[in-house]
Image (cartoon, helix red, strand yellow):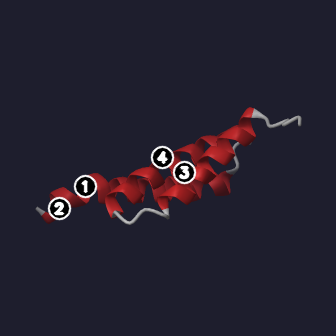
Amino acid sequence: MNLDISYVEMVGYLASVLLIIAFTLKNIRSLRIVNTLGCFTFMIYGVMLDIAWPIVITNAFIFITNLYYLFLKKRVDS
């Protein structure tokens, strides 16, 4: 069996797996951490696709939102 998967595709599959794992988690903090990693990986994937803006922009927004809830929201609530 010959798997001709490019590095770009591997990054895309890794990003997909991270997002799938994130949505199976019950703990919201863990979900946000894994989702943040998945979004970051998808941003890299979007750049590797010669800047696929819809992928980059959407995942950048989710990435920033996750960072807000992981780090800044705590300070605001305290």
The quarter of the displayed image where residue 64 is located: bottom left
Where residue 31 appears, as percent x and y from the top left, is: 41, 59
Disc marking residue 37: 4
Mark 2 or 3, nearer chain start: 3
Residue tagged 1:
72
Mark 2 or 4, nearer chain start: 4
Mark 3 or 1, nearer chain start: 3
Q: Characterize the local packing of mark 2: few (<14), some (14-19) or many (20 or more) Cα atoms within 10 angstroms.
A: few
Q: Quadrant of the C terminus?
A: bottom left
Left or right side of 66 for 61: right
Disc nearest the viewer among 4 and 1: 4
- Which residue in the rendered view is the most extreme toward the left? 78
Which residue is located at x 72 percent, y 38 percent? 8
| Along the line of sight, the residue nearer the viewer: 77 or 26 | 26
Tell me whether the residue at label 1 lies in contact with that at label 2, contact meaning CB atoms closer than 8 angstroms. yes
Q: Characterize the local packing of mark 3: few (<14), some (14-19) or many (20 or more) Cα atoms within 10 angstroms.
A: many
Tell me whether the residue at label 4 lies in contact with that at label 3, contact meaning CB atoms closer than 8 angstroms. yes
Q: Amino acid at mark 1?
A: Leu
Q: Characterize the local packing of mark 1: few (<14), some (14-19) or many (20 or more) Cα atoms within 10 angstroms.
A: few
Disc marking residue 76: 2
Q: Circle 3 — which element?
A: helix
Disc 4/disc 1 C-alpha distance (Å)? 18 Å
Q: Characterize the local packing of mark 4: few (<14), some (14-19) or many (20 or more) Cα atoms within 10 angstroms.
A: some
